[in-house]
Amino acid sequence: MAMNIADLFEHAADAFPERVAVICGERQVTYRELEQRANRLAHHLAGIGVGPGNHVGLYARNSIEAIETLIAVCKLRAVAVNINYRYVENELRYMLADSDLVALVHDRQDTPRVNAVRASMPGLLGTVVIDDGSGPGPDLGPGGGTGYPAALASAAPDRDFPARSNDDIYVIYTGGTTGQPKGVMWRHEDIWRTLGGGIDFMTGQPLADEWEQSRRGLESAGLVRLCSAPIIHGAAQVATLGALFGGDTVVLPARFDADEIWRQIDRHKVNVMLVIGDAMARPLIEAYRAGHYDGSSLVAISSSAALFSPAVKEACAAALPNVFITEAIGSTETGFTGIGMVTAGAEQRGGPTVKPGPDTVVLDEHDRPVGPGQVGRIARGGHMPLGYYRDPVKTAKMFAEVDGKRYAVPGDLARVETDGSVTLLGRGNTCVNSGGEKIFPEEVEGVLKSHPDVFDALVIGVPDERLGQRVAALVQPRDGQLLDLDALTRHVRGQIAGYKVPRSIWVVESIGRTAVGKADYKWARRHVTSHPPSAGPRPAAAPLAGTAQPGGASLPAGWRPAG
């Protein structure tokens, strides 16, 4: 059996070619059309030199073309690399270099940014430019490029690719806990078994073979699933691919707008909606209650990858009493590790309490399983990633061995309950999780300290009612300098993506540090709870100790309202 992503999709395309596969905005494609367009793109990429094992970047917002790119790259046995469309030039330059890209598929509106960094990437064989409606088609620059329609028109629609393998590689780039973004490498079979529908998430039972999803799809007309998150987010990718393997219709909003999503739910009779915690669930449920939408087609909502707070869960359960609501936990480094049902009036234990998935354990500091009432690091054995791309040191730290069995241990803390369930408590480090986006404090600190009027800085996460956490900074000006906080924010925004920019700033006389010069995060948390911020919203009154929220695949902040 070839449990390969491209093969799994082709089984579905053969089983129900005329069924609608993807709807995005006013456009839609059938499985046959999606298959043929992906074949054309794959042939074009092969024609410029892309082959097995090569990395192809996807630097794009939600579109049918983005889905086609993921499938086309897998058809070639190449590797798609997700790049956050919010990245500015220096971040894009890092990604291009770290991931060893040989080709890039990107939106037209990002052409100037791509041109600015392309000269530093001589190994880039070519780019394909998605027509995103952003303009009449600007000059592609000295490096050139091929328009997406032209790339498809010049290539054959035939499926004539060599046989593929379960061992083909799938990469999801994630950031925050690993410093700069790092690519988590999976075998196709392993990521399918953990995230792509290769197990029944409710029972933990593995599917019998590579055709079971398409067989089940033939037995029904398929469900309509709406993915609220951007397709460059790991959770959105695997959820979309898993839906396509089973013959469902995927609705992709072009951007996150709560009212427009409810209109699409009613227009397309959506059955299942994927959300990424409070960052999406809160505006969605508020829009539903205020907008008089029908929503009667909706039977299930699934949240993953970010904090789904008790208040928001309660609001969803109360407003949608006939909808089956679940929250899943996991990370890019482990895949699925557990799932729980959300019901009105249920006891809240802090973080999500879930039934652990197959091969999920909680380990103490000595890599031994903990008992009921004890806290440890959540881990998963069985199907797991190979490690981080080009980083053997962090790869070695990701894994633990227990009684001869290997486990992936990403750093989430959890408590084992007396009934065997697991309550996720949060990341055991300084990573900030804002609406599902993991943010590395030292990167933000470095940018803050590059401002000429800043002497020192420290970045932490503070509670946010909707996002779980928001980025906060304590900043020490240089002696004699009166810091212009608006200018500082503009400076930071010009160097890193907007979701990393501090939303609350405290100006302090000096940054608290330990005797050996390390950041004193306890001091920082004490300070922000006892002093009003110099700029930005006041933090929530709740204690800040231990506020890091559960980790997950990365969610681009363009998918939450600006504020």
Image (cartoon, grey):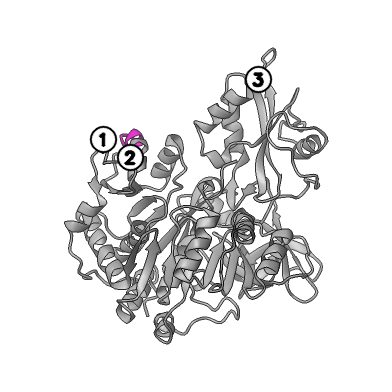
Mark 3 and mark 1 in contact (Cβ < 8 Å)? no
Q: Amino acid at mark 2?
A: Thr
Quadrant of the rendered image containing residue 169:
bottom left
Where residue 373 appears, as percent x and y from the top left, is 82, 68
Side (left or right) of 248 relative to 506 = left
Picture mark count: 3
Side (left or right) of 516 relative to 138 = right
Q: Amino acid at mark 1?
A: Gly
Mark 2 and mark 3 in contact (Cβ < 8 Å)? no
Camera-side residue: 256 or 434? 256
The residues tagged by marks 3 and 2 sit, at their Cα atoms, a distance apart of 35 Å
Alpha-carbon neighbours of circle 1 within 10 Å: few (<14), some, or many (≥20)? Answer: few
Quadrant that contains the C terminus: top right
Q: Which residues are magenta?
A: 114-120
The residues tagged by marks 1 and 2 sit, at their Cα atoms, a distance apart of 8 Å
Q: Earlier in the sequence, mark 3 or mark 2?
A: 2
Label 2 sits on residue: 111
Where residue 297 appears, as percent x and y from the top left, is 53, 74
Camera-side residue: 191 or 148? 148
Q: Secondary structure at mark 3?
A: loop
Label 3 sits on residue: 483
Q: Earlier in the sequence, mark 1 or mark 3?
A: 1
Alpha-carbon neighbours of circle 2 within 10 Å: few (<14), some, or many (≥20)? Answer: some
The residues tagged by marks 1 and 3 sit, at their Cα atoms, a distance apart of 39 Å
Label 1 sits on residue: 141
Camera-side residue: 151 or 109? 109
